[in-house]
Image: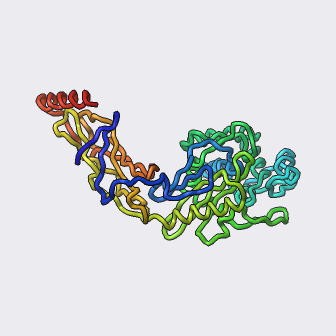
């Protein structure tokens, strides 16, 4: 196989029974959403991306981070589901029925079990429930919002900023479609014992029963979460998850014009993601993915392997849109120790980077003889001049 140098990188096209990508539109699917992002949970393959890193107001989708802080506190042993929290006048007035927003109708000066508050937030999108928990954990909602942003950074969410626990409009409160999906996958993977609350179809509190606001749960598509949102600035939004036929996918959409459009576009995107891809093993465990050039080594190349098998999702149609290549910083200087990360296998679907898999040296390469190093020096001088 021949290496090609691209700017400061070396790239190698991999022959994996895939043809060169033919000129075509950037996406295999179109949506009315202004921002959207969808990922396969098992392989990490990005199935769809549209303005996924644009900053948008989160609306009630911010409650996903509120839930993460709660779940993390329980998992750390600081709280239990049976702990109770007091309903302050602030929570009752600014999050309850008087506020005109979504509420669980928490009674003023009452106390509520944490599990009931979680259900109120997950099912009823209860603003009062969020404020009650925020004040109980951090003293004030402002302090809790700071915890939310700090926790986001710990999880690798670099752009999301939270100003309150409810998602109500606030200057500087922003998220991205990509980070909402990453947060949702984290909730599913790290808190399986709590993730079930997002799938509950109704919840009764204070003798008032409310149905889950997520329209996907009423559709026969395998949906089990997560959250809807709306603000005048960002439009209608949704983060959804579907589990079906041994696969799970997560998607976030924003910028839709109506509740109906949000439901239709979310269903179409998630259903397309389930129906239009087939899982394929690209490399088995232990397979050499590529050979990278080594400068000044006892051998001129080092084999690269992934840690475990590499599987990708291949479009059932438009297979010619799928390409793969290995990218790494070069030249690689000897000595090279086995197990050192050298590069990345990048899989593209059209213009979308679908999957990245780290690649590691599968052997140790010592320094070459003086003669070998001299030849490599001359070769690098010539290639560097051409570059």
Q: Position of residue 319 (x, y in %)?
A: 39, 61
Q: Quadrant of the C terminus?
A: top left
How was the colour assigned to the protein in this rendering? rainbow
Question: Left or right of 361: which side holds 134?
Answer: right
The answer to whether 4 is drawn above or below residue 370 in the figure is: below
Q: Position of residue 328 (x, y in %)?
A: 33, 40
Residue 73 can be seen, yes or no: no
Please report the residue visible at 85 percent of the width from the left and 66 percent of the height from the top.
207
Q: How many marks?
A: 0
Please report the residue visible at 72 percent of the width from the left and 45 percent of the height from the top.
233
Please report the residue visible at 30 percent of the width from the left and 35 percent of the height from the top.
330
Q: Position of residue 311 (x, y in %)?
A: 38, 59
Farthest residue, direction bottom: 220
Location of residue 284 by image quarter = bottom left
Task: Please tell me which residue lies in front, 271 or 107.
Answer: 271
Task: Please tell me which residue lies in front, 275 or 31.
Answer: 31
Location of residue 221 by image quarter = bottom right
Task: Please tell me which residue lies in front, 228 or 384.
Answer: 384
Task: Please tell me which residue lies in front, 25 or 345.
Answer: 25
């Amino acid at each position: 196989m021949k290496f090609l140098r691209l700017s400061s990188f070396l790239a190698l096209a991999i022959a994996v029974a895939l043809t060169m990508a033919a000129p075509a539109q950037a996406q295999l699917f179109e949506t009315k959403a202004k921002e959207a992002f969808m990922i396969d949970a098992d392989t990490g393959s990005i199935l769809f991306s549209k303005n996924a890193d644009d900053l948008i107001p989160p609306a009630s989708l911010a409650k996903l981070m509120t839930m993460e802080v709660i779940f993390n506190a329980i998992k750390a042993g600081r709280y239990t589901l049976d702990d109770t929290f007091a309903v302050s006048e602030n929570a009752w007035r600014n999050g309850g029925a008087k506020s005109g927003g979504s509420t669980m109708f928490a009674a003023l000066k009452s106390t509520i079990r944490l599990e009931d508050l979680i259900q109120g937030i997950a099912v009823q999108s209860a603003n009062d429930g969020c404020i009650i928990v925020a004040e109980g954990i951090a003293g004030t909602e402002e302090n809790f919002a700071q915890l939310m942003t700090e926790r986001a950074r710990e999880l690798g969410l670099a752009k999301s900023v939270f100003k309150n626990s409810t998602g109500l409009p606030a200057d500087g409160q922003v998220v991205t479609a990509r980070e909402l999906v990453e947060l949702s996958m984290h909730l599913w993977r790290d808190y399986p014992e709590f993730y079930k609350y997002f799938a509950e179809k109704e919840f009764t509190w204070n003798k008032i029963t409310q149905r889950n606001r997520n329209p996907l749960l009423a559709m026969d598509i395998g949906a089990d979460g997560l959250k809807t949102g709306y603000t005048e600035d960002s439009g209608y939004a949704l983060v959804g998850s579907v589990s079906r036929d041994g696969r799970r996918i997560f998607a976030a959409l924003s910028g839709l014009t109506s509740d109906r459009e949000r439901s239709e576009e979310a269903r179409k995107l998630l259903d397309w993601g389930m129906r239009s891809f087939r899982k394929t093993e690209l490399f088995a465990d232990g397979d050499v993915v590529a050979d990278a050039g080594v400068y000044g080594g006892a051998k001129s190349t080092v084999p690269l392997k992934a840690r475990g098998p590499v599987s990708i999702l291949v479009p059932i149609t438009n297979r010619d849109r799928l390409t793969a290549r290995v990218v790494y910083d070069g030249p690689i200087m000897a000595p090279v120790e086995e197990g050192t990360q050298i590069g990345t296998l990048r899989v593209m679907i059209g213009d979308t980077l679908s999957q990245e898999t780290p690649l590691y040296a599968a052997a140790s390469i010592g320094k070459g003889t003086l003669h070998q190093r001299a030849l490599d020096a001359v070769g690098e001088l010539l290639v560097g001049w051409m570059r």
